Image (cartoon, rainbow, N blue to C red):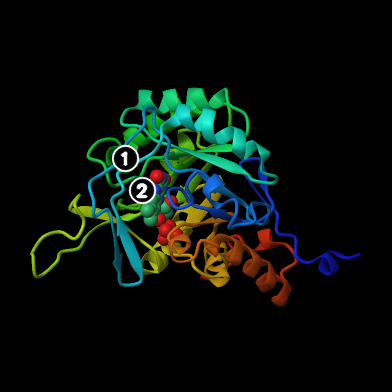
Amino acid sequence: MTTHDKGPDMRVTVAGVEFRSPVIAASGTFGYGIEFEEIVSLERIGGFVTKGLSREPMVGNAAPRIIETAAGMMNAIGLQNMGVRPFISEKLPKLRKLPGAVVIANVFGFTIEDCLEVIGALNDAEGIAMYELNASCPNTSHGGMVFGTDPALLHELTARCKAAAKRPLMVKLSPNVTSIGQMAKVAEDGGADAVSLVNTFVALSIDVVTRKPRIANVTGGLSGPAIRPIAVRMVHEASRAVKIPVVGMGGIVRAQDAVEFMLAGATAVQVGTASYADPRAVENIANGLRRWCAAHEVTHVSSLTGAALLN
Ligand SMILES: Cc1cc2nc3c(=O)[nH]c(=O)nc-3n(C[C@H](O)[C@H](O)[C@H](O)COP(=O)(O)O)c2cc1C
């Protein structure tokens, strides 16, 4: 049988970890994975990124925390999560039993020491393929914004987390910066094995009758199709600036959107907001990407990475 008879080869490798599809569920939109077990065939998708995990459990921000916007949504969940240790004892044993689920643990903290403690706890746990370090969450007044937007801090955070991590470290970059290429390079120089982008864009929406913000936190992070062309541009710039793999996301809702990110330079992609409209979105996009490759005579999906004709 030729490769063509078997269908396109959908495997990609990011930082030494092999994914059976380049389509991965993004952090904060796929729970801890378990919640989607009955809805999504986890073995059909590339994998998923957990909700951001912190040292201690967090209740998050006051409501309203999510609103719909034109072609997207804004959220200020405030990094609500069960905390890393309950994740390890309650969720991970169930995740380990699911066949084919590549689990990426998303890590954040308000200090570098917080992040090191989360990574240290995860290091001893089985069933995780990689860490994604959230240097970019725009919803807290400490931590995220500062790490992701200050080159010196981002370098220090990356270098110390990399030294502590027993697994590959992917650094998730903030898009709220002037030069995404520079920040990607800073992460690479700090020892990151891959970078992922984009996280949400800091945004504000005002109710014109009450004259109050539509989100209790005042600002929130904008995601969904509205940000896609900006995200594609940033993925392109980041991929030009570094040699490590770039994982792209921002408004992917169809297989063609995933192709666009890969052509711009992404090795793999993540799907976030689309799962809110359709919990099966990640699987549908993964299946659609396979069909798209077959229909366009792309025998290896990895050949799409950086293959846009831009000059
Ligand atoms: C409700 C919600 C919660 C999120 N929580 C996290 C999080 O905990 N950690 C993180 O790194 N990114 C988080 N994100 C960002 C997404 O993972 C993704 O980077 C962003 O939404 C852009 O992709 P999209 O347009 O496909 O949603 C969250 C996004 C949404 C919409």
Can you give x and y, in whole percent of width and height, for residue 183 in the image? Answer: 39, 45
| Residue 127 shown left or right of residue 74 in the figure | right
Can you give x and y, in whole percent of width and height, for residue 155 in the image? Answer: 39, 33
Can you give x and y, in whole percent of width and height, for residue 47 in the image? Answer: 60, 49
Residue ID at (42%, 40%):
52
Can you give x and y, in whole percent of width and height, for residue 3 in the image? Answer: 83, 64
Instruction: Please report whichever mark, 2 or 1, sits nearer to the chain's N-terminal start.
Output: 1
Is the Cβ of the residue at disc 2 closer than 8 Å to that at disc 1?
Answer: yes
Residue matched to label 1:
144
Residue occupying the far right of the picture:
1
Q: Identify the amino acid type marked 1.
A: Gly
| Residue 139 shown left or right of residue 238 in the figure | left
Q: Identify the amino acid type marked 2.
A: Ser
Residue matched to label 2:
174
Camera sees residue 242: yes
Queried on whether the Cβ of the residue with tag 2 lies below 8 angstroms from ligand 1, the answer reads no
Residue occupying the far bottom of the picture:
295
